[in-house]
Image: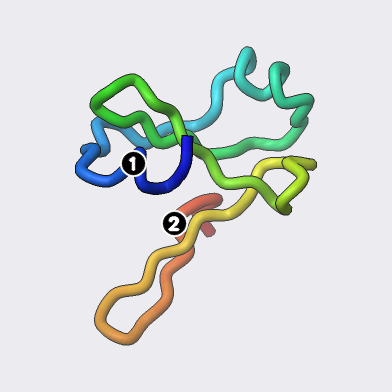
Amino acid sequence: MNATGLEGRKIVKVRKLTAAEKKRESWYGDGVAIDLDDGTVIYPSSDEEGNGPGALFSFKEGKTYRIFPAK
């Protein structure tokens, strides 16, 4: 799947990764999962090789916000 396969999808839930998801990726830290309306789950990684869970940020009205992990 590429990014174009995500166009038009809707976020239905934002949650922490489950133990099974972390085990599948061989990750030990907490991470965030974004569930889409078609069953796709997306999650940020700390790098392009998928070596660990990553942080999630947003940008709105000229300000950057850290969403996950929360401060």
Vertical placement of residue 61 versus 22, above or below? below
Q: Is residue 45 left or right of residue 40?
A: right
Label 1–label 2 contact, CB within 8 A? no
Q: Residue 16: which disc? A: none
The mark nearer the N terminus, 1 or 2, is: 1
- Residue 10 image offset from top left, x and y in percent: 21, 38
* Front position among marks 1 and 2: 1
Q: CA distance from mark 1 to mark 2?
A: 20 Å
Left or right of 40 in this view: 17: right
Badge 2 marks a residue whose secondary structure is: strand
Mark 2 crowd level (few <14, some 14–19, many ≥20, 10 Å Cα): few
- Residue 58: percent from the left, percent from the top? 39, 65
The image quarter in which residue 11 lies: top left
Q: Amino acid at mark 2?
A: Ile
> Going by the image, does 60 lie left or right of 64?
left
Give the labeled residue for mark 1: 6
Compared with 18, 11 (above or below) is below
**Residue visible at 78% across and 25% down in the picture:** 26
Q: Residue at x 35, y 39 (%)?
A: 5
* Colour logic: rainbow
Image quarter of residue 13: top left
Where residue 68 sits in the image (x, y, percent)? 50, 51
Q: Secondary structure at mark 1?
A: helix
The residue shown at (24%, 27%) is 37
Q: Amino acid at mark 1?
A: Leu
Tell me: 54 left or right of 7: right
Outermost residue, top side: 20
Which picture quadrant has residue 21? top right
Residue bearing the label numbered 2: 67
The x, y position of residue 51, in whole percent, is 79, 42
